[in-house]
Amino acid sequence: MAISDPTAEAIARAADLLRAGGLVGMPTETVYGLAADAANDVAVADIFRAKGRPVDHPLIVHLGDAELLPAWAEWVPKEAIALARAFWPGPLTMILPKAADVSELVTGGQTTVGLRMPDHPVALALLRAFGGGLAAPSANRFGRISPTTAAHVESELGDAVPIVLDGGDCQVGIESTILDLSGASPVVLRPGAISADAIAAVIGRRPMQREDLDAGADVVRVSGALPAHYAPVTAMQLLPLSDLMAAAAAGHGERVAVLARAPMPADFDGIWLRGPHSADAFARALYADLRALDAAGCARILVETPPPDEAWRAIRDRLERAARGAGARDST
Ligand code: TXA
Ligand code: MG
């Protein structure tokens, strides 16, 4: 794999590669994506192969311009237009009824398609040079921690991807909010940086949260919604600070790796990463922190339970799934 500075020439070469059916590691403001021509099933099949992802898990199609929405959606509700105007380019994916010619490989056999316009200059330049839609899941092995640097992509996918455009550290750091607009009422399928309140302020009604809906009702396949996901290899637990301090002090002869907002106690002997107090900054650093803790060779990772506020919802979601998926070398 070559990590490439995003020069005009490198972007033109990457667009050529995409047109020829190749895969490109693409920076976005949320996490790095593994991009392929969404209109080329052979190329899209390579994404699933490179990630080790089951083919019934749909991919998000990335667009360089909101004007392209009608080419991908059978119909575009007024609310989608208002949300695109408010939040695109940005970390909001909208699920809409798919246009007839959108590949079922992209949609995981569903009648809907996920669409988003990323807010990263390199992604937008690549999309514009390419011209069409790019299917791009996060550029990690299925079930693992999403990459927020070009080096993370390299360590996840190695030679399965010929080129990664280096767009620096992702500024949002966790995946986009996914809003399902294909049904009677909007539903947040995956929480992210765009909150339900921010969405409500634009469309005048509050979307439901998938986690509040009856499990089993109207189930959509969202791999990010599998109970175990975003997971380190080391076993991981979420604990309130007092329990975490007690567990860290007890030790049981094991070294532990900690992510907490509190400072490291003087007598602690292990790895202690201090997470920022603001949710935005915590999210930005989260996946790099989890990777560092995972690489520390400790017996366990202990993470301080995030605050209960709405601003921390997406971080709680990722940490809970990471804790459930952690410790399994072969994720399902
Ligand atoms: O921030 C992001 O969204 C990143 C960057 C690269 O854009 N992408 C990303 O892709 O997180 P991925 O594939 O790791 O997660 C996309 C999620 C999956 O959980 C998938 O199931 C869901 O979007 N999804 C895609 N199309 C869908 C659809 N038609 N209906 C329901 N869920 C869908
Ligand atoms: Mg993913």
Image: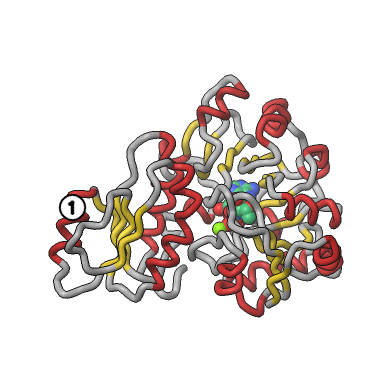
Count of residue discs: 1
Q: In which of the image's four quarters is ligand 2 placed? A: bottom right
Q: Which residue is mark 1?
A: 243
Q: Secondary structure at mark 1?
A: helix
Q: Is residue 71 left or right of residue 278?
A: right
Between residue 30 and residue 325, name the one nearer to us: 30
Going 38% across and 51% down the picture, which residue do you hit?
275
* Identity, as a three-letter code, of the amino acid under mark 1: Asp
Rendered location of residue 64, percent (x, y): 78, 47
Q: Nearer the viewer, residue 180 or 2?
A: 2
Q: Is mark 1 within 8 Å of ligand 2?
A: no
Q: How is the image coloured?
A: secondary structure
Residue at image point 36% right, 73% down: 296
Image quarter of residue 313: top left
User: On the image, which quarter does residue 109 sit in?
Assistant: bottom right
Residue 290 in the image: x percent, y percent? 42, 62
- Image quadrant occupied by the N terminus: bottom right
Location of residue 8 (image quadrant): bottom right
Q: Residues within 10 Å of mark 1 (few under 14, many from 20)?
A: few
Would residue 66 be visible to someone looking at this image? yes
Q: Is residue 285 above or below residue 157?
A: above
* Residue found at the very far bottom of the displayed protein: 159
Q: Residue at x 63, y 73 (%)?
A: 50
Residue 115 visible somewhere in the drawing: no
13 lies left or right of 273: right
Q: Tell me residue 305's x, y (percent).
A: 30, 48
Residue 102 on image: x %, y %: 77, 51
Farthest residue toward the top?
204
Looking at the picture, tell me which residue is in the foreground, 77 or 147. 147
